């Protein structure tokens, strides 16, 4: 598993940004503008939730099936779930509600990523009993966050096609979902990179 901001030397861990330092609202808004996220995207995400809210288990099963096809990814994410949730990635009672909550918040409150704020607070104020190195070891490798962005969007296509939506509407929902996920990855990256680089 990757540790955030792997640097040469003894200062590697201390160079990681302070996790409690969640990006300011102005920074987040700027990222939305740069990512061309619009009111149309917000509407598309709300429509996406209406389609997916009864299919979140099916969507999670598809995602887990994709993850299982890559042993390195499956091992990394299973270890992350075990360390953070005391659980495995087998679609158990803990993973499913968390996935559903992430999907709901991504679709209905994309500009207020409360799940990310909770994650930042989880990693804030590391004590001597919880050094930053131990905390950072629980995060999945950053490379996986980036590479999973598109598959998360592509995987849901079959669920949208099955809902009898027009091709243009499916594309609009997928683009909006991808924009929201990429913003989340951009915000998560602050837990991985040196402060002056982010």
Image: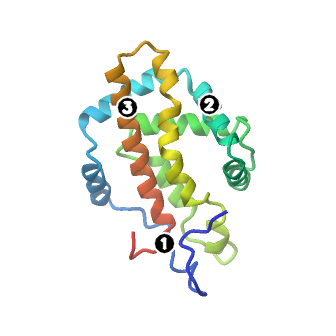
Query: Of the residues tagged 2 and 1, which is closer to the observer?
Result: 2
Residue 100 spot, x, y in % from top left? 56, 34
Query: Which labelled disc corresponds to residue 29?
Result: none
Earlier in the chain: of badge 2 and badge 1, it is 1
Q: Is residue 55 above or below residue 34?
A: above
Q: Is residue 42 above or below residue 126?
A: above
Q: Name the secondary structure under disc 3.
A: helix
Query: Of the residues tagged 1 and 3, which is closer to the observer?
Result: 3
Q: How many numbered marks appear? A: 3
Display colour scheme: rainbow
Disc 2 from disc 3: Cα separation: 20 Å
Q: Name the secondary structure under disc 1.
A: loop
Tell me the quarter of the picture where residue 92 sits: top right
Label 1 Cα neighbours within 10 Å, binned few <14 / some 14-19 / many ≥20: some
Residue shown at 67% from the left, 70% from the top? 134
Residue 151 spot, x, y in % from top left? 52, 40
Q: Quadrant of the C terminus?
A: bottom left
Disc 1 from disc 3: Cα separation: 31 Å
Query: Which labelled disc corresponds to residue 45?
Result: 3
Query: Which labelled disc corresponds to residue 62?
Result: 2
Earlier in the chain: of badge 2 and badge 3, it is 3
Residue shown at 62% from the left, 35% from the top? 97
| Residue matched to label 1 | 18
**Front-most of 192 and 70?**
70
Q: Would residue 69 be found to the left or right of residue 147 on screen?
A: right
Q: Name the secondary structure under disc 2.
A: helix
Residue 3 spot, x, y in % from top left? 61, 68
Residue 182 spot, x, y in % from top left? 41, 49
């Amino acid at each position: 598993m990757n540790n955030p901001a792997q640097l040469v030397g003894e200062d590697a861990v201390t160079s990681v940004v302070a996790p409690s330092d969640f990006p300011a609202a102005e920074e987040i808004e700027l990222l939305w503008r740069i990512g061309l996220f619009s009111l149309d995207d917000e509407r598309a995400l709300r429509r996406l939730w209406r389609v997916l809210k009864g299919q979140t288990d099916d969507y999670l099963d598809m995602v887990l099936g994709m993850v299982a096809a890559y042993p390195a990814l499956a091992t990394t994410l299973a270890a992350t779930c075990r360390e953070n949730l005391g659980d495995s990635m087998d679609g158990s009672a803990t993973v499913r509600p968390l996935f559903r909550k992430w999907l709901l918040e991504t679709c209905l409150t994309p500009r207020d990523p409360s799940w990310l704020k909770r994650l930042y607070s989880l990693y804030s104020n590391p004590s001597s009993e919880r050094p930053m190195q131990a905390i950072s070891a629980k995060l999945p490798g950053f490379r996986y966050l980036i590479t999973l962005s598109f598959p998360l969007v592509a995987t849901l296509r079959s669920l949208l096609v099955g809902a009898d939506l027009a091709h243009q509407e499916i594309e609009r929902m997928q683009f909006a979902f991808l924009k929201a996920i990429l913003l989340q990855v951009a915000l998560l990256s602050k837990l991985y990179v040196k402060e002056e680089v982010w």
